């Protein structure tokens, strides 16, 4: 494959499938999108025409088995992640899987076990790791500029942002949860990465549903189905303890009565310095000559974007046989923590993580 283009099949022609189609179509010198599929065939045909995709597969199963597909991009509701990813891995395909990796940790565990038995590249699409400011912070962390990161705080408060009320987004058996598994998984993943990937060992958390059941807090993402149901949370909070003694505080909401700019954030607190990230901006913080020192971080005006870097990384891992930065193990770690938060909320007790495969 050193000189050949990587042939990609996209499962899911909705919003996120369109994003992947757009980004991979920009990398025509490295790859070619050969097929696309969707449960709603007119949408698959529309995306095929829009992005010049040669073929529309009648089903995900048909797409996975095609000889002209080397790698599969999966952008469908969470409940279908594990079945399709495992099928693709067992068919010898490389897999780029939208977050969360699984609808729960059991599903993620099965994906991880399948990936460990294969030579397939399995990557989770956590694009925030490829944003410019977090990449700059990560570089400073790896250089030791922050010293030992002993605690961190991350979150994403949406003031009024419940997506697709009544659709799969708000049904536990299809999504796995609300904002915790939707946007909280992004913040958890990025925070653990910037902290140096410490191993989480226990969780204390709580979830609340004060808006969705009343049909309040509705956002603009997705089309509501008022005949549907809402049985997920709309706010979650947790304290996560690591094996090395460090801690991470996580707070996310789809809807909340508070003064918020709806922007994701992370604060890293280290022995020698700290770092803050909020949207497209960030800061490095330390103390010199008995005075606080701050250095602003911004993305360049000509920045190509996190999605472009994510797509290129996936192709590079396939071509060079490398382990992706957002590997199946990181996806399993995230799912393990999320499940523990939900369980802690149900029981009211601290939950210790089960790392057994």
Image (cartoon, rainbow, N blue to C red):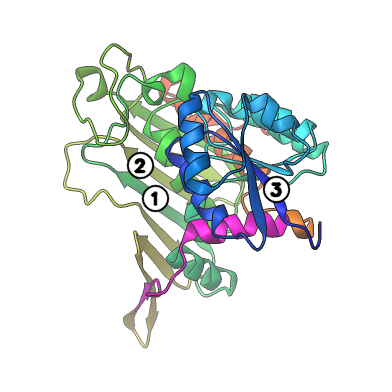
> Distance of mark 2 from mark 3, alpha carbons?
39 Å
In this rendering, the answer to whether 88 lies above or below 281 is above
> Distance of mark 1 from mark 2, alpha carbons?
7 Å
Residue drawn 21% across the image and 48% down it? 260
Residue 172 is labelled as none
Which segment is the magenta one? 295-317
Question: Residue at label 3?
Answer: 7
N-terminal label among 1 and 3: 3
> Distance of mark 1 from mark 3, alpha carbons?
37 Å
Question: Residue at label 1?
Answer: 154
Q: Quadrant of the C terminus?
A: top right
N-terminal label among 1 and 2: 1
Residue 251 is labelled as 2
Is residue 144 or residue 31 the one in the foreground?
31
Q: Position of residue 181 (x, y in %)?
A: 45, 34
In this rendering, the answer to whether 244 lies above or below 297 is above
Mark 3 Cα shell of 10 Å, populated few (<14), some (14-19), many (≥20): some
Q: Quick check: is 202 in the magenta stretch?
A: no
Q: Quadrant of the N terminus?
A: bottom right
């Amino acid at each position: 494959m050193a000189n050949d283009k990587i042939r990609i099949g996209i499962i899911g022609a909705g919003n996120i499938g369109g994003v992947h189609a757009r980004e991979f179509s920009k990398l025509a010198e490295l790859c070619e999108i050969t097929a696309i599929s969707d449960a709603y065939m007119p949408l698959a045909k529309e995306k095929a025409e829009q992005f010049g995709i040669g073929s529309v597969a009648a089903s995900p199963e048909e797409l996975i088995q095609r000889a002209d597909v080397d790698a599969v991009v999966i952008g469908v509701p969470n409940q279908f992640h594990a079945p399709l990813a495992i099928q693709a891995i067992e068919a010898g395909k490389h897999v780029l899987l939208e977050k969360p990796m699984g609808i729960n940790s059991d599903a993620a565990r099965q994906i991880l076990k399948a990936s460990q038995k294969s030579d397939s590249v399995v990557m989770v699409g956590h694009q925030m790791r490829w944003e410019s400011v977090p990449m700059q912070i990560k570089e400073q962390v790896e250089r030791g500029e922050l010293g030992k990161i002993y605690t961190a705080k991350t979150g994403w408060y949406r003031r009024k942002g419940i997506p697709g009320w009544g659709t799969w987004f708000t049904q536990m058996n299809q999504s796995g949860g609300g904002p915790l598994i939707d946007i909280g998984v992004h913040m958890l993943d990025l925070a653990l990465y910037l902290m140096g990937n410490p191993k989480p060992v226990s969780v204390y958390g709580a979830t609340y549903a004060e808006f969705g059941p009343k049909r309040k807090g509705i956002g603009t993402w997705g089309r509501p189905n008022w005949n549907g149901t809402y049985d997920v949370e709309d706010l979650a909070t947790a304290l996560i303890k690591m094996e090395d003694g460090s801690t991470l505080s996580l707070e996310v909401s789809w809807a909340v009565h508070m003064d918020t700019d709806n922007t994701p954030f992370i604060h890293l607190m280290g022995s020698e310095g700290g770092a803050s990230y909020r949207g497209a901006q960030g800061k490095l913080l330390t103390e010199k000559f008995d005075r606080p020192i701050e250095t602003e971080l911004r993305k360049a005006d000509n920045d190509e974007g996190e999605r472009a870097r994510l797509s290129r990384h996936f192709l590079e891992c396939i071509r060079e046989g490398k382990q992706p930065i957002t590997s199946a193990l990181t996806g399993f770690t995230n799912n393990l923590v999320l499940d523990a938060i939900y369980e802690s909320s149900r029981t009211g007790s601290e939950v210790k993580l089960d790392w057994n495969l």
